[in-house]
Every structure is written in C-alpha cells, then in structure tokens.
Image: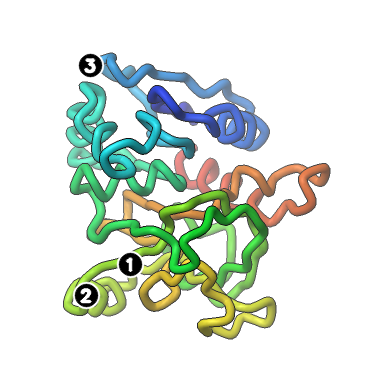
C-alpha cells in the first residue's frame, strides 16, 4: 500500500504518521509539499496534525486553499481514501470534504493528554481493525477540537453511520465527563457520505509504539493497510 502525506508550513506530525504507516505496511510513505499541484498514484492520502500556517485566520482555512488541495479533492471524488488527523481534520472541514467545523475547546485551553474513544462502527476501511463498541486510549493535542455541526447535520451523520469515534469514559460510557473539549454528541471522528474520507482529532499514530505508553492506535493502521493492500 502506497500512502502520500501532505505537508503544510506548520505541519508537525508528518513523521509520526509516516512511521506508523511504515511499521504496518513495510512501504515508505511519500511526503508531498502543499504547493505541489499533482499527486503520484497512491492508495491513501493523509493530512497530518500540526498548525498549518500557524493556525492564523482560522484553523485549516488557509491550508484548504493550497494548490495540492485541488488534487486531494479530485482524488477523493474519484474514490481515493483520505485521512485527516487533528489539524488535518480541520483542513478537511474547511475544504468541504467533511461537514461541520472544529471550534475552540470548551475549556479555552490547549489539551495534551490521553483520551478514551469508543469505536462506533467497524464497517469502514478506517475502523475495520477494531470491533464496534471497543474502547481505545490515544492522545490528543489540540486547542480547537470542539466538533460542531447543526442538528440536522448531526442527525444525518448518526442516521448514516458516519460517526466513527466518540469521546468516552474508560468504561465506554459516553458522557460529558469523557468529553473534555465539548464536541457535539461526543464526536471525535466523522466520515464522508461514502465512508472513504475520515477526519478525527485524536492521534492514533502516537499510540503505535510501547514506548509511547499505548499501542491502541496500531490496529487503526494495520486494518487500514489490510483494506488497501
């Protein structure tokens, strides 16, 4: 499986996701600069975490206008899977590839900690490494991770099975206590209508090595690699 990682000025998790994909696939992912206007033939496009353009104006708003995003949109429309993590999720919403927006955390503070996630579905190429209802522990690192969408959009996401992950307590309870950033309905990750574009705020790539304290993110990437190989 060949992946391409899109890099913007201010990206800072590109090496983390590169290493996670390489561990699982045995193939060196490509790194593509945001000012490029073409992408090689790849099986997966990843937009990593960071602070694209310093998060000036609005998180992801400037990156969404970069030349490479025209090609990312075209590839997504043609069916190439696209994964956006943290800042990548923000960019996907700003680019119109996913609904909703990421607002400032309800605490008004930057969150850097482990969180628990409930896997809402295992019927996608991104989540097939888990079982529905499984609880995993992965890190977050964001100031603007509070997912928001209007009620109709939220109802549509729920009805179409497009909520991939929810913030929860360690026992899987979906509650306010397990939702530190205030995301609507505890949503941590959402899919597009065809379930081939995923955006999520937590960082599964930083839970793929025992030295990092958790390997709960490994199944995310092994399942994805298996689906696309």
Residue at 67 percent across and 33 percent down: it is 23
3D distance between C-alphas at marks 3 and 1? 30 Å
Q: Is residue 221 above or below residue 120?
A: above
Q: Is residue 123 above or below residue 141?
A: below
From the image, tell me which residue sits under label 3: 37
From the image, tell me which residue sits under label 1: 162
| Quarter location, residue 65 | top left
> How many residues crowd mark 1 within 10 Å: few (<14), some (14–19), many (20+)?
many
Residue extending farthest to the right is 211
Badge number at residue 156: 2
3D distance between C-alphas at marks 3 and 2? 33 Å
Q: Is residue 175 above or below residue 117?
A: below
Pair 3/1: label in front:
3
Pointer 2 with pointer 1, Cβ within 8 A: yes
Secondary structure found at label 2: helix
Q: Nearer the viewer, residue 2 or 70?
A: 70
Looking at marks 3 and 1 on the same chain, the residue that comes earlier in the sequence is marked by 3
Residue at 40 percent across and 63 percent down: it is 146
Secondary structure found at label 3: loop
Can residue 46 be seen here? The reply is no
Q: State the image coordinates of residue 176 (x, y, percent, origin top left).
A: 51, 82
Q: Is residue 54 left or right of residue 216?
A: left
Q: Nearer the viewer, residue 163 or 89?
A: 89
Q: State the image coordinates of residue 181 (x, y, percent, origin top left).
A: 48, 66
Residue at 38 percent across and 69 percent down: it is 163
3D distance between C-alphas at marks 2 and 1? 8 Å
């Amino acid at each position: 499986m060949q992946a391409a990682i899109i890099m913007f000025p201010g990206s800072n998790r590109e090496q983390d996701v590169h290493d996670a994909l390489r561990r699982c696939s045995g193939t060196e992912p490509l790194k593509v600069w945001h000012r490029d206007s073409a992408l090689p033939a790849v099986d997966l496009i990843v937009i990593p975490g960071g602070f694209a353009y310093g998060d000036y104006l609005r998180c992801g708003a400037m990156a969404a206008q970069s030349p490479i995003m025209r090609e990312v949109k075209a590839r997504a429309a043609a069916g190439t899977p696209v994964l956006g993590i943290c800042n990548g999720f923000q960019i996907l919403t700003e680019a119109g590839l996913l609904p909703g927006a990421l607002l400032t955390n309800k605490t008004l503070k930057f969150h850097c900690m482990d969180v628990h996630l409930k896997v809402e579905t295992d019927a996608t190429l991104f989540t097939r490494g888990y079982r529905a209802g499984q609880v995993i522990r992965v890190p977050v690192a964001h100031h603007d991770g509070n997912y928001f969408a209007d009620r109709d959009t939220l109802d549509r996401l729920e009805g179409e099975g497009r909520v991939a992950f929810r913030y929860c307590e360690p026992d899987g309870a979906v509650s306010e206590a397990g939702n530190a950033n205030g995301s609507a309905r505890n949503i941590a990750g959402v899919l597009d209508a065809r379930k081939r574009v995923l955006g999520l705020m937590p960082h599964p790539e930083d839970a793929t090595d025992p030295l990092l304290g958790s390997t709960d993110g490994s199944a995310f990437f092994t399942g994805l690699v298996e689906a696309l190989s």
